Image: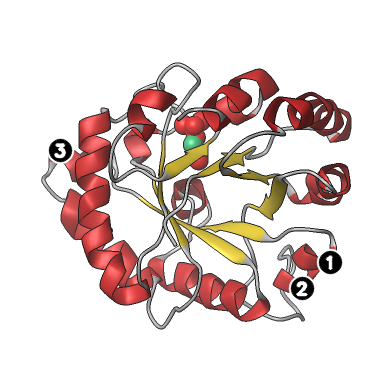
């Protein structure tokens, strides 16, 4: 089950025309790629990106999913809705959701169980803040996020380790730190969900991706800023 996955997280970027231009550029650049390629786009881009991705090696995902099937949940999007417009993956528990939108380990768990029930491939994000790292709480935080977040979950679950202090800051974890922390995460998740791909995320870019992906524990990347430029993203996709 461990495999190289390079996933883009567009966050709240890319209008329709920009998404189309990106796809037109990216498709030929990555057609011979050896890894699994995923683009997690804003909800409003999913269908367009999905249509452009048909017949290519690019998978499409969302950046969140409701824990409910349907009903009175204003502003939420269900797994069936996502699948209907072409998503097959979804990010769950991104640190920006945790920090700005009240996401908790419990809500992450509910969303994860729903994604699995509905056949979406989840990419579950975990990571410590700078205070937690400096306070020696990295392992405790990750262990809590993983045991609570993955409770009762079974299936193909991709994990992304994203130290909060490295996201969008240009401050990447060193390959050694990322590798060591992912080794710790692997020790916790393997008994819970079996062997799985664990990605690194946080200021990964065309210049530093190879040194991170060379590390034995790092199976791939979840890339924010550098996934908005087709040329940069394709360089990461083609890393050995
Ligand atoms: P970044 O974002 O690559 O811009 O740091 C990564 C993420 O938040 O998934």
Q: Image height check: is 113 above or below 97?
A: below
Q: Residue at x 80, y 58 (%)?
A: 86
Q: Judging from the image, what secondary structure is the residue with disc 3 in? A: helix
How does the figure colour the protein chain or chains?
secondary structure
The Cα–Cα distance between marks 1 and 2, rounded to whole angstroms, is 6 Å
Quadrant in which residue 187 is drawn = bottom left
Helix or strand or loop: what does disc 1 sit on? helix
Is 103 situated left or right of 183 in this image? right
Q: Secondary structure at mark 2?
A: helix
Distance between the alpha carbons at the discs numbered 3 and 1: 44 Å
| Residue 99 spot, x, y in % from top left | 44, 49
Residue designated by label 2: 80
Q: How far is the residue under mark 2 from the one under mark 3?
A: 41 Å
Of tags 2 and 3, the one toward the viewer is 2
Q: Earlier in the sequence, mark 3 or mark 1?
A: 1
> Residue visible at 49% across and 46% down?
96
Q: Which of 36 and 82 lies nearest the eye of the viewer?
A: 36
Instruction: Please report contact status of discs 1 and 2: CB closer than 8 Å, yes or no.
Output: yes
Dot 2 or dot 3: first in sequence order is: 2
The residue that label 1 is drawn on is: 84
């Amino acid at each position: 089950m461990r495999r190289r996955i390079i996933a883009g997280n567009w966050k709240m970027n890319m209008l329709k025309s920009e998404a189309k231009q990106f796809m037109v550029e990216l498709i030929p650049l990555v057609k011979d790629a050896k890894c699994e390629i995923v683009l997690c786009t804003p909800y409003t881009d999913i269908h367009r990106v999905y249509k452009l991705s048909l017949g290519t090696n690019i998978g499409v995902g969302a950046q969140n999913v409701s824990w409910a099937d349907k009903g009175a949940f204003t502003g939420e999007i269900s797994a069936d809705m996502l699948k209907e417009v072409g998503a097959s993956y979804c990010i769950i528990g991104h640190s920006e959701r945790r920090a700005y939108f009240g996401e908790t380990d419990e809500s992450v768990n509910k969303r994860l169980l729903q994604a699995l029930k509905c056949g979406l491939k989840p990419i579950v994000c975990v990571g410590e803040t700078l205070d937690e790292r400096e306070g020696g709480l990295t392992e405790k935080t990750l262990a809590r996020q993983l045991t609570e977040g993955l409770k009762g979950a079974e299936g193909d679950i991709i994990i992304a380790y994203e130290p909060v202090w490295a996201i969008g800051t240009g401050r990447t974890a060193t390959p050694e730190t990322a590798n060591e922390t992912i080794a710790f995460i692997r020790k916790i998740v393997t008994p819970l969900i079996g062997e799985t791909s664990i990605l690194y995320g946080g200021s990964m870019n065309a210049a530093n991706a190879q040194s991170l992906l060379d590390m034995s524990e790092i199976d791939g990347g979840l890339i924010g800023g550098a996934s908005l430029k087709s040329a940069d993203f394709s360089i990461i996709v083609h890393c050995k």
